[in-house]
Image: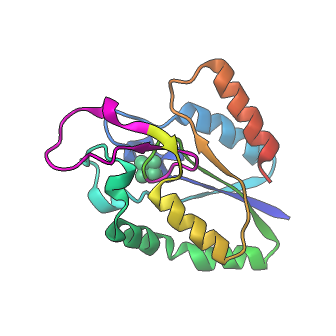
């Protein structure tokens, strides 16, 4: 049985992330090396924010992306994935898991950045954005697609670069243990 892991776009491409943030590519590199050596494949999902607002977008909250327009955009860019997933499923391949991005209003799977009050002219008050339980808008749309295809797989999220070596080790061990 072949196994494929779906990953958020910036798992491999830190240049899609808003400045000055970068994704934790040191950790993705370790994860990639491990799972490739175990025979897994990786499928890079499209970046919903870059393909909607471009590289010069501001940091935004879950609530700002929670619109019919962004959901429709997410659905549209995920549409080409659906027949590919169906074909994999028809040919002895399982979706082993999804790795999103912790804190992202679009790609978080468990901890997402929230600020219901953000709107209007941008002020640099990033600290007022809270981390709450929940998933990003793009992942919610992806989850519906996976449900419709009867794909039941674990969801993980890549932590940011500022985690301790111990936290990194704990996260990596959990990923290796729970990936299908
Ligand atoms: S929208 Fe998702 S893929 Fe794009 S930069 Fe943000 S977390 Fe990464």
Residue visible at 16% across and 49% down in the picture: 120
- Residue 14 lies, in percent from the top left, at 44, 41
Query: Would residue 178 be counted in the magenta stretch?
Result: no
The one of 154 and 76 positioned closer to us in this rendering: 154
Residue visible at 27% across and 46% down in the picture: 117
Q: Up-down: is 121 above or below 153?
A: above
What quarter of the picture does the C terminus occupy? bottom right
The reply to whether residue 12 is visible in this rendering is: no
Number of callouts: 0
Residue visible at 28% across and 55% down in the picture: 54
Residue stretch in magenta? 106-130
What quarter of the picture does the N terminus occupy? bottom right
- Residue 86 lies, in percent from the top left, at 68, 78
- Residue 10 lies, in percent from the top left, at 48, 47
Give the residue at the far left of this rendering: 121
**Does the magenta stretch mainly form a helix, a strand or a loop?**
loop
Query: Would residue 128 be counted in the magenta stretch?
Result: yes
Residue visible at 71% across and 54% down in the picture: 154
Colour scheme shown: rainbow
The reply to whether residue 168 is visible in this rendering is: yes
Residue 21 is left or right of residue 139, and the answer is: left
User: Residue 49's image quarter?
Assistant: bottom left
Give the residue at the far top of this rendering: 165
Residue 113 is left or right of residue 58, and the answer is: right
Residue 179 is left or right of residue 110, and the answer is: right
The one of 159 and 3 positioned closer to us in this rendering: 159
Give the residue at the far right of this rendering: 1
């Amino acid at each position: 049985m072949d196994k494929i892991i779906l990953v958020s776009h910036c798992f491999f491409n830190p240049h899609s992330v808003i400045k000055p943030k970068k994704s934790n590519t040191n950790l993705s590199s370790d994860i990639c090396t491990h799972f490739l050596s175990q025979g897994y494949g990786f499928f890079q999902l499209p970046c919903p924010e870059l393909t909607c607002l471009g590289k010069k977008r501001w940091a935004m909250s879950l609530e700002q992306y929670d619109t019919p327009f962004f959901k429709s955009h997410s659905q549209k860019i995920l549409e080409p994935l659906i027949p590919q997933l169906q074909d994999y499923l028809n040919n002895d391949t399982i979706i082993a898991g999804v790795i999103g991005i912790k804190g992202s209003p679009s790609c978080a799977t468990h901890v997402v950045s929230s600020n219901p009050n953000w709107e209007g002219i941008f002020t640099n008050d990033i600290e007022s954005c809270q981390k709450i339980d929940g998933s990003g808008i793009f992942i919610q749309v992806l989850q519906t697609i996976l449900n419709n295809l009867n794909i039941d797989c674990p969801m993980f999220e890549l932590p940011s670069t500022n985690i301790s070596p111990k936290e990194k080790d704990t996260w990596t061990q959990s990923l290796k243990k729970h990936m299908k």
